[in-house]
Image (spheres, rainbow, N blue to C red):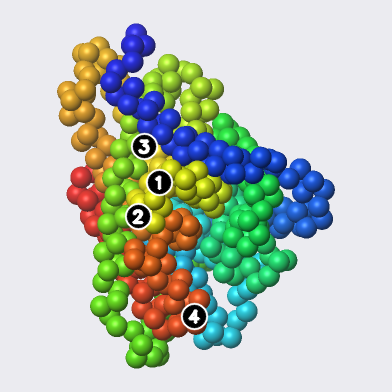
């Protein structure tokens, strides 16, 4: 029988969940309190609002569909050809692309566009950037799901002489069906809430999304009622969709794979050639922006750049990232404790609601949260003095959903395998942690690296709370690119990218050595 009494860890979990929710509550309270008129309801009948909403949905829908559709054949190629050259390096590159700081990608695409004389502005550029960031993530998720197919299923398919179409329909599709829905919804929400990419590559009012419109309403017009209305629309659409796919979909995301790969059919002839071609083409596409940055370095003029000017922003970026990652991991782990109890008790509806609350920062407009919290704190603290602290805290709230999504499957797996035994032995606190830690250690370390890299790449929050005294590498890249100093922007981008790659490489080593 499960214990219903609240242990200290469960109480801490409820406190952690409340803290994450309160950040958003205080942000909206700051905006509502500043403007007593509330949201601008007349905006709902405005033609420009309709065009923004349609474009936001259109670009997010196309980005998610293309990312998932293009990822599927590449993931199958990895699954069926595990000995293809560069296999492990490609999976690492996929992870690097997903967590790549947005401004690094934008700089690479702009440099690449100049070199090849391509027009990357408007819907085409937005789709290209979104696919570059999200397709590699989808590849890894699909590959992990395919790896979960039991060897016995393939052996039985041979005995029953199933055709390729039957194997696809009976064996492969069930393994990714739930994941596909969840993955599509997750990528849709990321693209729907996209800010930096649309702002940099949108090219004009005709390519404006809700998030950019919120930024413009706050930054240029300081129109709080309009920003509130746009924020509520965005929150309802993105949050509602994410809640639906969380209810009907499932995914293990980037968790450690525990399936066997001793027996897998190997394609031959033209099918093998087609799979290899898609694999090598994916290599080429993912490396193009990085190659463009390298060419920009080789051809650039660095007469105005002092390398020492990069030292302090680099140190600040790493420090902020570590702080946000440490606090974010602690919050994610502790808030999962009461959610795990709901899962063990079979309280699926309550579990889904509280999982949504734990990950709601994915759908809450980052610009609204930042500006709202800024207004809420403006008359309460010295923003100029403590602004960098709130950059770290808001970064923490942004990375918590990713930590929750990545830790959750492994912790659920522990509960399913050892939960009943742990309860029968009345293990709690430190005694339970000593058993749980070796089981979750590889995923915990990889999750820490993931959220660390994500926290290091933020620029939206810094644009509100940051200052010249505490400049980060992403903001430095933004300043260089904004003044058309593309050589310096390429140098800072390559430095940030190298740091991210090093962190992910270390996490891959830690994951394999501790798995």
Depth-wise, is mark 3 or mark 4 nearer the camera?
A: 4
| 3D distance between C-alphas at marks 3 and 4 | 39 Å
Figure quadrant of residue 480: bottom left
Depth-wise, is mark 4 or mark 1 nearer the camera?
A: 1
Residue in the picture at 27% in, 69% down? 312
In the picture of the structure, the residue carrying the numbered disc 4 is: 483
Q: In the rendered picture of this protein, how many numbered marks are placed on residues?
A: 4
Q: Are marks 3 and 4 in contact (CB under 8 Å)?
A: no
Assess disc 3: are there few (<14), some (14-19) or many (≥20) residues with their C-alpha within 10 Å of its C-alpha.
many
Q: Are marks 2 and 1 in contact (CB under 8 Å)?
A: yes
Depth-wise, is mark 3 or mark 1 nearer the camera?
A: 1
Q: Element type at marker 4? A: loop
Assess disc 2: are there few (<14), some (14-19) or many (≥20) residues with their C-alpha within 10 Å of its C-alpha.
few
N-terminal-most mark, 3 or 1? 3
Q: Element type at marker 1? A: loop
| 3D distance between C-alphas at marks 3 and 2 | 28 Å
In the picture of the structure, the residue carrying the numbered disc 1 is: 381
| 3D distance between C-alphas at marks 4 and 2 | 27 Å
Residue in the picture at 30% in, 38% down? 330
In the picture of the structure, the residue carrying the numbered disc 2 is: 385
N-terminal-most mark, 3 or 4? 3
């Amino acid at each position: 029988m499960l214990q219903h009494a609240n242990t200290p860890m469960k109480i801490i979990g409820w406190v952690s969940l409340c803290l994450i929710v309160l950040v958003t509550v205080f942000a909206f309270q700051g905006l509502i309190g500043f403007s007593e008129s509330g949201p601008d309801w007349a905006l709902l009948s405005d033609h420009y609002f309709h065009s923004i909403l349609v474009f936001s949905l259109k670009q997010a829908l196309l980005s998610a569909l293309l990312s998932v559709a293009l990822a599927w054949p590449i993931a199958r190629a990895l699954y069926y050809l595990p000995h293809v050259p560069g296999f492990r390096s490609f999976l690492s590159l996929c992870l690097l692309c997903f967590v790549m700081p947005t401004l690094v990608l934008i700089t690479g695409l702009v440099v690449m566009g100049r070199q090849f004389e391509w027009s990357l502005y408007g819907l085409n550029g937005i789709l290209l950037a979104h696919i570059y960031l999200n397709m590699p993530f989808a590849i890894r998720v699909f590959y992990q799901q395919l790896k979960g197919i039991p060897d016995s299923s393939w052996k039985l398919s041979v005995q029953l002489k199933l055709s390729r179409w039957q194997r696809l329909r009976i064996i492969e599709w069930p393994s990714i069906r739930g994941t596909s829905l969840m993955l599509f919804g997750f990528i849709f929400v990321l693209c729907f809430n996209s800010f930096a990419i649309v702002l940099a590559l949108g090219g004009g009012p005709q390519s404006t999304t809700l998030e950019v419109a919120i930024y413009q309403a706050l930054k240029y017009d300081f129109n709080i009622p309009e920003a509130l209305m746009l924020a509520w629309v965005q929150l309802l659409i993105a949050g509602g969709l994410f809640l639906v796919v969380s209810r009907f979909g499932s995914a293990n995301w980037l968790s450690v794979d525990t399936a066997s790969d001793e027996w897998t059919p190997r394609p031959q002839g033209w099918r093998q050639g087609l799979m290899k071609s898609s694999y090598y083409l994916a290599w080429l596409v993912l490396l193009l922006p990085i190659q463009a940055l390298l060419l920009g370095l080789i051809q650039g003029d660095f007469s105005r750049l002092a390398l020492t000017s990069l030292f302090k922003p680099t140190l600040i970026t790493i420090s902020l990232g570590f702080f946000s990652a440490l606090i974010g991991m602690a919050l994610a782990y502790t808030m999962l404790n009461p959610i795990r109890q709901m899962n063990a008790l079979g309280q699926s509806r309550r579990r889904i609601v509280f999982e949504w609350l734990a990950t709601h920062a994915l759908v809450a407009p980052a610009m609204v949260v930042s500006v709202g919290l800024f207004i809420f704190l403006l008359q309460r603290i010295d923003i100029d003095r403590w602004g960098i602290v709130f950059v770290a805290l808001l970064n923490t709230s942004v990375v918590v959903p990713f930590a929750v999504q990545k830790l959750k499957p492994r912790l659920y797996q522990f509960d399913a395998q050892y939960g009943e035994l742990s309860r029968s032995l009345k293990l709690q606190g430190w005694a339970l942690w000593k058993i749980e830690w070796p089981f979750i250690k590889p995923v915990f370390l990889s999750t820490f690296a993931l959220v660390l890299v994500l926290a290091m790449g933020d620029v939206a929050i810094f644009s509100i709370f940051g200052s010249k005294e505490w400049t980060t590498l992403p903001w430095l890249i933004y300043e260089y690119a904004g003044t058309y100093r593309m050589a310096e922007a390429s140098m800072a981008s390559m430095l940030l990218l190298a740091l991210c790659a090093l962190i992910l490489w270390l996490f891959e080593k830690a994951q394999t050595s501790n798995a």
